[in-house]
Image (cartoon, rainbow, N blue to C red):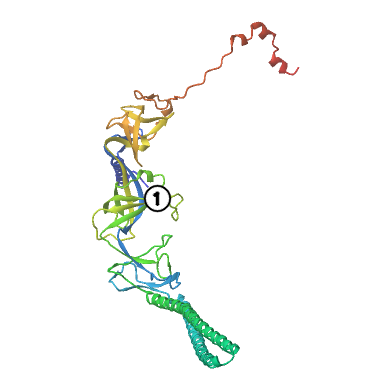
Amino acid sequence: MDWRKPGWRFIAGAALVVIFGGWLLSGETATADGELVATVERGDFEVTVTTSGELRAQNFVEITAPPDARLAEAFQMKILSIVPEGTTVKAGDIVAELDRSTLAPKLQEFTLALQKAEAVYEQAMLDSTLNLSTAREDIRSKELALEEKRLAKDQARYEAPTIQRQAEIDLERADRALKQARLDYETKTDQAKAKMREVGADVERQRNKVAAVQSVMGQFSIRAPSDGMVIYAKEWNGKKRTAGSQVSAWDPAVATLPDLSRMESITYVNEIDVRKVAVGQEATITLDADPSKQLTGKVTAVANMGEQRPNADAKVFEVQIAVTGIDTTLRPGMTTGNAVTTMRVPDALYVSLEALDSDNGIPVVYHRDGGRVVKQEVETGATNDDQVVILRGLEEGDRVLLAPPSDAASLKVERLPGSTAGTDTMPQPPVPTAAPEDVPSSDTLRALPDTAAAATPG
């Protein structure tokens, strides 16, 4: 490659122009020594929490499996087929078909149980009829016996007193037997009624089970309750339900028909940033499907409890952001970028966060002042991902280095008036001193052995 050729010189010059233009657009310039320099700017400063999320309708109608599935003991149902997601349906249109094979054994089981219960009912009815018929015949026999004893008593009034007494006893015994038979008949009637109620209840229970299974199987062709666009429901792990998915009696949603006029972005904020987010804060929403479109929104809810989401290492909190206005191009499930404005500082001085350094706990910047560099202490305020607010120490238009110079360690920090940053305010313990009487005299010191000499081997 020959750089002396005009073509290559033109390409190299164009590349330098592009690089230099990029520095200008980013607010950064380069000095003659190749140092990157940022300019202190003034304006509205914003702190944002940025997350990704997903659109969903604020209001929607659920399309569910049969609500009486538990009565038919259908606790798990398989989706056999379902219309493609995004299909526009009318009220009454079939949206999905559930697998009926799971209920066929139940229907057969309940039908056999019903037949058994009906046989027991019929047997109980026959037994009751026979028992009551026998009891009625016994009453009639005792009525005739009583009549005979009454005639015998009348005939014995011309007999001896003992015979008359015997006739009276026989009449009383026959009367008591008749009364007891009538009481027994009433008791047997009550027993027969109770037995029929018992077996009748079992028959009704089995009939209801069979009817419930038949009704639920008839509802396995799931129809749309109203007009709308079909959006698949999600399972607990975030996956959408499709053909082959399982639907439970406790989570029966198969799909939804969303109201597209009111949309919201559902996002999850990590536990470090969620304390900054509050209801009512404004947000900017972008769409991965259309990066050129920007929507505005407002935080409507922040979860109080964190949760562990799939593929997330830390706990996150659900945040709901309502989309302002109506946009007919929005669809549930679209991936969103959400920038929630958690703080806004009007008319603030700020500079690139890369320009901020620390010297023994003192926040400093390297201020380019003409031909020299000053290690200037600054008082900082709020920060965001890229910039930091400067409360004291710099002015608008000042230029600061984005990286410490090579002689940064030798530069003295220019402190701010009244600043206490980096100073050790902890009280120092006093240095112990010997009492006058504990200080050895010079004679004592001369009398002490030379420990160094004694330690030297002879």
Q: Nearer the viewer, residue 13 or 261?
A: 261
Quadrant of the rendering where the C terminus is positioned: top right
Image height of 456 relative to 51, above or below: above
- Displayed quadrant of residue 152: bottom right
Q: Residue at x 39, y 62 (%)?
A: 234
Examine the rendering and report whether any part of residue 340 can be seen.
yes
The residue labelled by disc 1 is 317
Q: Relative to 44, say whether 65 is above or below.
A: below
The relative height of residue 374 versus residue 62 in the rendered view (above or below) is above
Residue nearer the viewer, 167 or 204? 167
Residue 372 place in picture, x, y as percent: 34, 26
Viewer can see residue 32 = no
For this view, does 196 lie left or right of residue 417? right
Query: Is 17 on the left-hand or right-hand side of 79?
Result: left
Residue 249: give x, y in percent of width and height.
42, 67
Where residue 237 appears, as percent x and y from the top left, is 43, 60
Q: Position of residue 217 (x, y in %)?
A: 40, 76
Q: Is residue 46 above or below residue 166?
A: above
**Residue shown at 34% from the left, 69% from the top:** 84
Q: Residue furthest right?
A: 458
Q: Secondary structure at mark 1?
A: strand
Front position in the image: 141 or 228: 141
**Around disc 1, counting alpha carbons within 10 Å, would you say few (fewer than 14), some (14 to 19), or many (20 or more)?**
some
Numbered label tally: 1
- Which amino acid lies under the numbered mark 1 shown in the image of this protein? Phe
**Residue 450: quarter of image:** top right
